[in-house]
Each structure stands twice: as C-alpha cells, then as structure tokens.
Image (cartoon, helix red, strand yellow):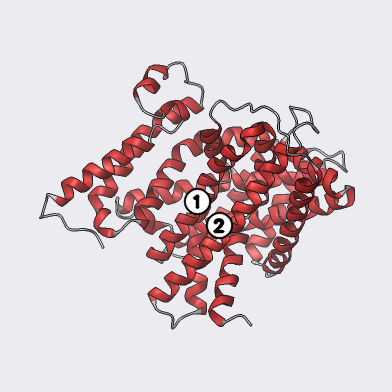
C-alpha cells in the first residue's frame, strides 16, 4: 500500500507533468533525432538540458519561493519583474498558444479534410474562447484521461521502434550537436512554462494543504518535480532515439507533424495513428485554454480583478491565436526563435539565481547577472534575425557566441565577481 505522502507526491508529479506536457513538444524530438544520426545521444543531452533540467530547476525555485511568476524577478526590481512577467505572457499567448492550432490542423484535420488552416484556426479559437469564459471542468476531466493515454501510446511507439529496428544510424546534419539540441529545447517553452505553471501548483497545494508547513510543501514540490522531470526525460530521449533509428524511412524534408504521424503509423498502424492525432489535438486544446486563461487571469489581477479586462484579454488572445494559428508549424517555430533567443537566457538565469543560497543571490548580484545576461543575449538575438555576418567579429570575441550561447560565460563570471564584491562589502546584506 502506498503511504499518504507517496500518493501526494505522485498526484503532484502527475499534475506537473500534465502542465509541462504540451502536445507541441511531441513534434520536436522525433525530427531532432531523425537529423542527429549516430550523435543522437549528444543531441538528446542538449535537448533535455534546456527542455527538462532547466524547467525542473524552475520548479525547485518555486519550491523555495512558494509565490508567483512575479517573485522570480523582484530582486532585480518590481518594475523589471512586471515587464518580464508581461513579456512571458505576451510570448505565450502569441506563439505556443497558436502553435497548438497549427499542430491540430496538420495532424488531425489536414490528413482527412480539404479545409484551409484559417478555418481550423477560427473554429479552434472560438471554442477556446467559450471554454475560457466558462472555465469548464470538462478540461480537467479530459486532462486526467488524455495524458495517461498519450503517454501509453508514446511508450508503445518507442518500445516498438527499439525492438523492431537495428541500432544503425545515419550521419548527423548538425555541426554542433549538443548546442543545437539546447537551442531546439528552447522551442518546448518548458523553462517559461516552469515559471508560469509552478505558480499554479503552489496555489493548488496551498488550497489542499492549508495546515502544511513551508518545509513540508517544499519537500513535496521538489520530489514531485524530479519525478515529473524523469518522465519527461524518458519520453524526450525515447522519441529522439526513435527518430534516429528510423532515419531512412522518410524524406529528408518531412515536416515535424508528418514525421510524428509517420512514425506512429509504421510502429502501431493507421488506427493508432488516428487515435494519437485525436488525443494530441485535444491535448493541444487544453494547452491553449490554459495559456489564454492564465494570461487573462494575470492581466485581470493587475487591473483590480476587473472582469471586463479579463474578457478583453481573452478576446485579444483568441484573435492573436487565429492570426498566428493559420500558419504552418514550421513557420511559427521559425518566428518564435528570436523571441526565445532573448527571453530564454533571462529566464534560465532567474531560475538559477532563485535556487542558489540567498547569501549568494543578493539584490545586487541579481541585478548584475541579469543585466549582463540581457547585454550578451543581444548578439544571439540579432543573429537569429539574420545579422550573422555583421556579428562575425563579435562572435570571435565572446566565448560560446558561435553556439548562440554567448551569455553563459559572462553571466557566470559576473556572478562570481559580484559575490566577491558583496563578500568584501560588510555594508551589503543579502536580500531575504
């Protein structure tokens, strides 16, 4: 028999996994593996570093803070934290939310119906709006049923591929497999998701365990976080190696959604592929509703709980979804890259600063490291929008800039220097 504590950990871990596990994430690992060849394991390590390890560290930070997204940046300044929070929600409602409509069209509509993506997007976000303003409990019921079903199908796909194909791999197309895996992991939006959904988990735990101490909740969140992270790692790594094993089965220019559908058809047959398409579409829908609802809730809170503001935000979020959701998944992923190259390094740094001991993360350390990260992320951001040649000289100067990770070493060096200065300045005290 499971103890009460173990059941609580499992329930919380399942909730965390469900919040992280967006259907859009499913389409990224197979194509990554398909292109990685014999270096699939190196690509998988990079992908899981940014798509699993950093997000779970975000949950660890939430376990320590036990607050909201606003608390992540407040040591820099309340103004910075508000701007950062608004940016996170703006990106979420403009990119990953519409991507769910695009995935739904490509996986569940396009193979069976000759209808334009704009029509799918309009119908899709009209339904999203209905659910957002009604806050239906049907979504919670669907979520509890959908996630186990998708996980079961995925493990069947991965297991079938592992036992059906020889471990023979093609050549990799990546020049820098590990860093390319890291950058592709950005596209899961899971680090951003950790900052956002961690707050949802905190609220849920506070409502269910009103008598629990800070330490009890901290232990529960940490254990659940690592368990959810292990599950994500197994699925991501499994899908990457599956894509790598089946490198010769598909055309080199196949799309992400088509590859996932093709892999499921070859491993489980056409009926299973149809079932997977339906489940992925429903999971996409719950993700979109969650993003629009979360964004509307945040804006509503900033405007003194105004229902009119909530309604207006929901309408704008769904209109944005229609506009962006009519494009194909590959285009949305390409458009998302510049935004991610800028906001992801800041998010990673805020997560790491919030999990180190307070004596190493004073307000001055926060400000110095975050400002440095922003400055050294600018070349990577500009490079992502086509200024690669103009930045070639800068990339030679900044370590790791050629891998689009030019912010890493400067942020680390400034963290050390700021702490040394802080240690030698007795007038400075750590922020609580």
Residue 413 against residue 171 in the figure, above or below? below
Residue 10: where, in percent of width, then height? Answer: 59, 71
Badge 2 marks a residue whose secondary structure is helix
> Which label is found at residue 229?
2
Seen in the image, is 143 located left or right of residue 52? right
For the residues bearing labels 2 and 1, Cβ distance under 8 angstroms: yes
> Mark 1 falls on what kind of element?
helix
Q: Which mark is residue 53?
A: 1
Kindly indicate the quadrant of the structure image that contains residue 15.
bottom right
**50 to the left or right of 168:** left
Closest to the observer: 246 or 25?
Answer: 246
Q: Residue at x 10, y 55 (%)?
A: 427
Q: Nearer the viewer, residue 217 or 384?
A: 217
Image x and y of residue 18, in percent: 63, 61
Examine the rendered structure and indicate whether residue 355 appears above or below residue 181: below
Look at 44% across and 60% down and name the residue there: 60
Q: Which residue corresponds to the image point at 26% horizontal and 63% vertical from the top-left?
A: 432
Disc 1 packing (10 Å; few <14; some 14–19; many ≥20): many
Left or right: where 177 falls relative to 167: left
Quadrant housing the N terminus: bottom right
């Amino acid at each position: 028999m499971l103890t009460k504590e173990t059941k609580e950990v499992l329930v919380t871990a399942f909730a965390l996994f469900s919040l992280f596990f967006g259907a859009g994430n499913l389409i990224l690992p197979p194509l990554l593996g398909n292109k990685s060849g014999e270096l699939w394991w190196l690509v998988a390590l990079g992908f899981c570093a940014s798509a699993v390890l950093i997000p779970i560290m975000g949950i660890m930070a939430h376990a320590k803070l036990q607050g909201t997204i606003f608390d992540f940046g407040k040591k820099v300044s309340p103004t910075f934290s508000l701007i950062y929070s608004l940016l996170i929600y703006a990106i979420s409602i403009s990119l990953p939310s519409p991507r769910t409509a695009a995935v739904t069209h490509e996986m569940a509509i396009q193979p069976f119906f000759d209808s334009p993506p704009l029509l799918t997007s309009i119908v899709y976000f009209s339904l999203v709006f209905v659910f957002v303003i009604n806050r239906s409990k049907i979504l919670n019921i669907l979520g509890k049923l959908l996630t186990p079903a998708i996980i079961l199908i995925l493990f069947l796909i991965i297991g079938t591929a592992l036992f059906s194909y020889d471990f023979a791999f093609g050549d990799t197309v990546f020049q820098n497999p590990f860093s390319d895996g890291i950058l592709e992991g950005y596209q899961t939006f899971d680090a951003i998701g950790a900052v956002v959904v961690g707050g949802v988990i905190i609220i849920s735990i506070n409502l269910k365990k009103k008598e629990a101490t800070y330490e009890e909740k901290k232990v529960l969140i940490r254990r659940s976080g690592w368990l959810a992270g292990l599950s994500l790692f197994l699925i991501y790594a499994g899908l990457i190696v599956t894509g790598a094993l089946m490198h010769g089965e598909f055309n080199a220019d196949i799309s992400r959604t088509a590859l996932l559908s093709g892999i499921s058809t070859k491993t489980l047959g056409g009926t299973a592929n149809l079932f997977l398409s339906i489940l992925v579409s429903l999971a996409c829908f719950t993700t979109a509703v969650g993003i629009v609802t979360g964004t509307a809730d945040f804006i509503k809170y900033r405007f003194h709980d105004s229902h009119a503001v909530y309604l207006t935000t929901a309408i704008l979020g769904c209109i944005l979804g229609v506009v962006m959701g009519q494009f194909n998944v590959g285009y949305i992923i390409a458009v998302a890259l510049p935004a991610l190259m800028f906001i992801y390094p800041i998010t990673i740094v805020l997560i790491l600063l919030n999990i180190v001991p307070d004596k190493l993360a004073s307000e001055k350390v926060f400000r110095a490291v975050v400002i440095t990260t922003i400055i050294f992320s600018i070349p990577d951001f500009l490079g992502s929008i086509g200024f690669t040649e103009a930045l070639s000289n800068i990339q030679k100067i900044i370590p790791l800039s050629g891998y689009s990770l030019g912010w890493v070493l400067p942020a680390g060096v400034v963290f050390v220097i700021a702490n040394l200065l802080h240690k030698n300045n007795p007038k400075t005290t750590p922020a609580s």
